[in-house]
Image (spheres, rainbow, N blue to C red):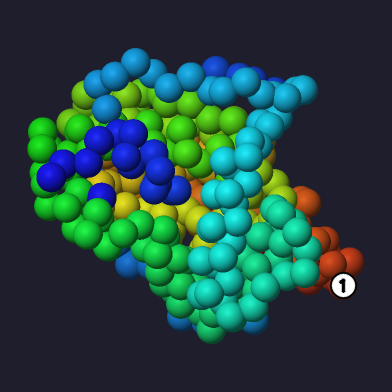
Amino acid sequence: MATPTTSRLHGHLLPALPSRPPRVPSSSAPSARGPSRRSSSRLYCSSPPVEAPPSGKGGEYRPSFADDLLLAFFRAKMVEEVGWDSQKPGYDGLIEVANRLMIKGKSASETEQSAVRVLQTLFPPLLLVLFKALLAPIANGQIASMMVARATALSCQWLMGTCSVNSVTLPDGKSLSSGVFVEKCKYLEESKCLGICINTCKLPTQTFFKDHMGVDLYMEPNFEDYSCQFNFGVPPPPLDTDKALQEPCLDICTNARRRRELGSSGGPDGLCPQV
């Protein structure tokens, strides 16, 4: 992350509407990276499918005691990186720390790098080295992709909400059960910010899995219904063609609402100025 097992990965992996069938992921994206549209600064495995666990009313995921421990652990690592903690308890406090991470970074790229460091601290360094060296190369990465998909679906619902494993289309046209569909991402819904989703979740997570675990990942957040499709084994497109980076600010974004009240649209074409 000896050869680690799926159950062992479950204890370490992180990587957020009512119940709905998994959405079909988009066609595979090219592996070549083009120039980035992000400026340097900003305004301030082959096993049975993993079934979603019992949920609360309306499909809302009910965190368990273990989930609370994972939340506390992840938040502690975020606090170490940011150097600041919120006085609010639980998930609300985590979102405030994520906001502070955005403010601390002098650029979107710097924020992304900080988030990648947080993800690294969640794993024993040797586990990442062994996973990338021993498991990632097997079967062109397909086994590793299925393993991390299952581990993500099992261990990250406390962060993202109800999710389940589904099939994705690989670059060679084959179908593989290495996807994770998040019904309604809690992290996006609670942060209310497209920039936080992009800079502290989507791009850092894609970078982390590729650089530190040897697994391609393309994340497709849906900013209309807050669902998200993880495509493990699929390279992300160049940044300047990634649809998620071309989206306007969310209607629920408090900063965007304030800019509208002041007669300003923020970035060009209403794009989030923090992306």
| Residue 134 appears in the picture as rendered | yes
Most foreground residue, 71 or 167: 71
Above/below status of 176 relative to 36: above
Above/below status of 18 relative to 34: above
> Is residue 249 found left or right of 202 in the rendered image?
right
Q: Which quadrant would the C terminus be assigned to in this image? A: bottom right
- The answer to which image quadrant residue 257 occupies is bottom right
Q: Give the residue type at disc 1.
A: Leu
Badge 1: how crowded within 10 Å, few (<14), some, or many (20+)? few
What is the residue that sits farthest to the right in this orientation?
Answer: 261
The residue pinned by badge 1 equals 262
Residue in view at x 63 percent, y 40 percent? 65
Most foreground residue, 183 or 57: 57
Give the SS element for disc 1.
loop
Most foreground residue, 246 or 124: 124
Q: Position of residue 110 (x, y in %)?
A: 46, 77
